[in-house]
Amino acid sequence: MTPGRALGLALAALLAAGPFLPLGGMKEYGLHVMVQIFIWSFIGGAWSLMGRFRLVSLGHGAFLGLGAYATTLLWNSWGLTPWLGGVLAVLLTAVVAVIVAYPCSRFQVVGHYFALVTLAVGEVVRLLIIAERNWTGGSLGVSLRPAGRDSLVAMQFADKRVFYYAAFVLWLLGLWVWARVDRSMARSAMEAIGEDETAAASVGIHITRFKIGITVLSASLTAVGGVAYAQYISYVNPDTLAGIGVSLRIVFAVVLGGMYSLLGATVGTALTIALGEYLRIVFGLRFIGMAETIYGLLLIVFIIFLPSGIYGSLRDLVQRLRSAPARAEA
Amino acid sequence: MIEPIFLAEAAINGIMLGGILALLALGLNLIFGVIDIVWIAYVDLVMVCMYVLYFVVQVYGWPFWLGALAAMAFGAALGVGVHLLIITPILGSAPVNQLLATGGLLFFLQSFATFLWTTDHKSVRLALPSWEIGGIFLPATRLIPFAISILALAGLYVFLTRTYVGTAIRAVSQDREAMALMGASPQRIYIVTSAVGGLMAGLAGALLLFQYSVHPFFGGQFGPLTFMICVLGGLGNMVGAFVASFVMSEIISIAGVVWSTEMGYVIAFVVFIVMIFARPGGILARRQ
Amino acid sequence: MSLLELRGVTAGYGQFTALWDVSLSVAAGEAVAVVGPNGAGKTTLLRVISGLIAPRAGGLAFDGAALGGKPAYEIVAHGVAHVPEGRRIFPVLTVSDNLKMGAYLPAARRRFAESLERVYALFPVLAERRAQRAGSLSGGEQQMLAIGRALMSRPKLILLDEPSMGLAPVMVLRVFDLIRRIREEGYTILVVEQNVRQVLKLVDRAYLLEVGRIKMEGRAAELGEQDFVRKAYVGL
């Protein structure tokens, strides 16, 4: 067993044992933060599936919102279990993803254009939610209709530990998918697309199919994340689950962590959530906006000084340290 | 069925709105065309300029026109500051990082404005007349901003086509390296461009304050729309952005009357998405 | 004393080194050619002189000033005009705006009208098309515009990178003819060309560059006589 794998297993064991650790009064809060980290890391990982192939989406809020709202509204209006509602929501998201991805890929909408098209999709979903206020609750959002008791069918539980384990499993699932995509044949092909469209085309890769495939996968997983988040928070709101704000936050976390590594999204998400929570505790209700101000400022600083993310910058540093003695010998 | 008179009024309002949208879109497009970076926070700079104008007019009692000039100067300084502090270090970075750095600025400006001025809506009361022609209301709060924005765009056109620096700005957007060979320092051109872009943000802010109240999240109302107009017109294409501004403002204005404000935006955005697929190079681009 | 002097210049892009220890000089009033096969580093040489890339080692002196490592926009002000490979005119600007940009430097701006008259006299076709978009010109006309734009800065030295590239044979002859006329006006020229036979007729001296190193140097006529040069490049 390699040291890296041993460390990973130890960490996974620690995370699995998390709810039983003696945290005293901090327990509920600690679990809450961890659930958020798991879910948003999962969503970040889903975003990075596309991002690493230079499909920079600024509209993942759309997929998140579709997942969350479809499930919530199906449950509230018709009492459809989120298990089934979630499947329908993910299918709906996949269809939307195809509608966006097919023409983008067909007409070579790339770079800034792709980012702005996806941004428009995110805004369309947010505005549709607000416009259809009769049954979506508009910009005030809508609460999940309580089932009244713990219910597997309604996916509602009073005990945070249930959500903790569910989110933990979801996170592991996300890592597994990420690693699968990373390892599969698609990897070299898609990276070739990132590098040079014509070169990839000449070796016989169907670019359109790959781009659509990866977009649908990324969007569907994001919708799953939206379902999970909505069930956990039991309240959906167009500004926290759709639109530019949330889309940018997802991208920030991933770029901060490093989008080319398995744990990049997790590291970045954990860091931004920890930072956000810390600032919230420090300022509390005293200086409204101050926590977010510092958050924004730090993000700018991070992007300027750690352009390849925390993981990438650490790797560069290690490489430089390793090559420095080698050069001294030569 | 909606009475034709309301549709006519909506169409005229659309034209009025289009002038200001064009100002916003051309400011952003100028910066994009020259520096090749999309300022995600552009309309949030407008928001800050609106606050500046609000304070000098309402709190310090300056006349509105003087406050507007101050807001423009402030916008220009802000533009230069953004370029030097945020854009210059990331000129060579990956596009996603460039988007995110200005996206971080968006978070910063929105929350700092919340911290300083709370989320209350603030507006300047202007006692201006309104005219009625054939049942259509033409308030000065719409006519004056429209006239000024058209004048300002004409001024921009003259600046970009008649002066050395303006022509150099257009030249840099076509070939950065060749312009360096003509003896123009790229950084100086960037600073001038950012200042002009900021100046236009200040002016747009002043004109928007005629009709809208300002709050920290004002940028969300016009920001995405502005990007879309730029893309629709063709990134870096000034004439295209001008035309696209009026197309979008008409859609928003007329659909807003027929259905609802949000649906107006939704339809405009859907038209945008469809247009991107039909004409990826912008509405004025020739099909290949 | 020479106008341009390179001593032991080494330069390249990233990990790749395109020029090794290149020394070269051009005297005022002289026309000099650099010839060599594709990928020899000819374009890199001109880019180092005009400041588009900084030399890694060696010295670059022009008109008594050390210019190595200075940015391009400063080097232009010393009197070096670079007509880059592929012409690089501003396609969406009009012909006259392109020429206006050639006179961007403050010193050149003051003599704009006079320079413009000279360029239009030299290239009457540019005067005819002054209001047209530069991108709509033919290849040969674009090359004239690129050269005219360089002249607008009132340079002491003109760097020409492959002026005949991509032109129809009849246009190639015209461009060489024009370069001869510019030369007769007293400009100092450093030209890089694939078309060795033509260019050797035009210049006083020539350098042969191969895989980034100067292989040979001499009077144009003498170099043309060298057996292997004739066989390899002149095609006789």
Image: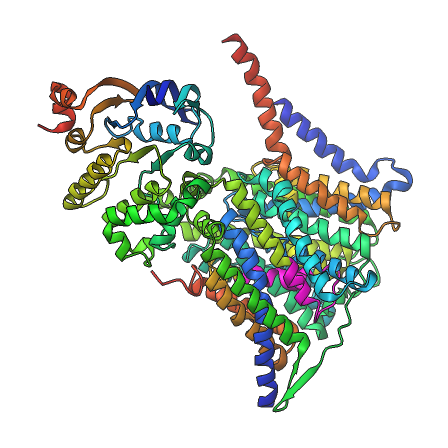
Q: Determine if the magenta segment contains residue B212.
A: yes
Q: Is residue A89 visible?
A: no
Indicate the quadrant where residue C197 lies. Answer: top left
Residues in magenta, as a range: B202-229
The front one of C198 and B225 is C198
The front one of A277 and B162 is B162
* Residue B218 image offset from top left, x and y in percent: 70, 62
The front one of A216 and A124 is A124
Which residue is found at the position 65% from the left and 45% from the top?
B81
Q: Left or right of A239: which side holds B35?
A: left
Q: Is residue A125 visible?
A: yes
Q: Left or right of B185: which side holds B89?
A: right
* Residue B105 image offset from top left, x and y in percent: 67, 48
The answer to whether residue B169 is above or below residue B84 is below
Q: Left or right of C44: which side holds B162?
A: right
* Residue C40 image offset from top left, x and y in percent: 28, 26
